[in-house]
Amino acid sequence: MFEKSAQLTRITATKRLLVAESELNRTEFLRTARHVQLGFRRLADGVRDIRSNASTVLKAVAVFSVVRRLLAGRRTPGTQRPWLSAALSGARAVAFFLLRQGRRKE
């Protein structure tokens, strides 16, 4: 009888150890899941910041484009294109490309 009771005690102890280990694993999993969730939130915030900055750049390019057109109207025919005008044309092309990329991802 004592042997059977010792065997049950060992089985009970093993079961308790397994339950405790399972609880530790569950706690560690939840901690890791929260950490991953926080990482995704930070990533989403970064994407929002980039999108906001891109919007600001697009607005600035639009303003510079208007300025370029005003300056181009004052240019005399046959003169070389001003460097500001060339730079703004390039910026407008880049802004167009970024705007198209942003629309595809939405």
Image (spheres, rainbow, N blue to C red):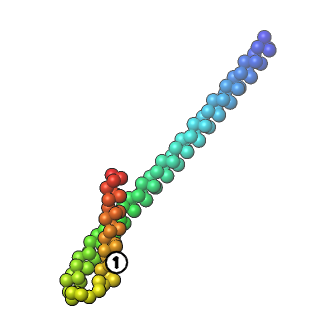
Question: At label 1, which amino acid type do we have?
Answer: Ala
At a point 23% along the width and 76% down the height, the residue shown is 66
- Quarter containing the N terminus: top right
- Whether residue 86 appears in this view of the structure is yes
Q: Nearer the viewer, residue 81 or 8?
A: 81
Which quadrant of the view contains residue 7?
A: top right
Q: Position of residue 72 (x, y in %)?
A: 23, 82
Question: Is the residue 5 above or below the residue 23 in the image?
Answer: above
Name of the residue lying farthest toward the left: 73
Which quadrant of the view contains residue 32?
A: top right
At a point 34% along the width and 57% down the height, the residue shown is 102
Which quadrant of the view contains residue 21?
A: top right
Instruction: Count the labels in the image.
Output: 1
SS state under label 1: helix
Mark 1 neighbour class, 10 Å CA radius: few under 14, some 14 to 19, many 20 or more:
some
Q: Position of residue 73 (x, y in %)?
A: 19, 83
**Residue holding disc 1:** 87
Looking at the image, residue 9 sits to the left or right of residue 79; the answer is right
Q: Nearer the viewer, residue 22 or 106?
A: 106
Looking at the image, residue 101 sits to the left or right of residue 7; the answer is left
At a point 31% along the width and 55% down the height, the residue shown is 103
Q: Nearer the viewer, residue 90 or 53?
A: 90
Question: Is the residue 23 above or below the residue 103 in the image?
Answer: above
Q: Position of residue 12 (x, y in %)?
A: 69, 22
Looking at the image, residue 22 sits to the left or right of residue 78; the answer is right
Name of the residue lying farthest toward the top: 1
Name of the residue lying farthest toward the front: 78
Looking at the image, residue 40 sits to the left or right of residue 21; the answer is left
- Whether residue 56 appears in this view of the structure is no
Q: Position of residue 19 (x, y in %)?
A: 63, 29
At a point 31% along the width and 74% down the height, the residue shown is 89
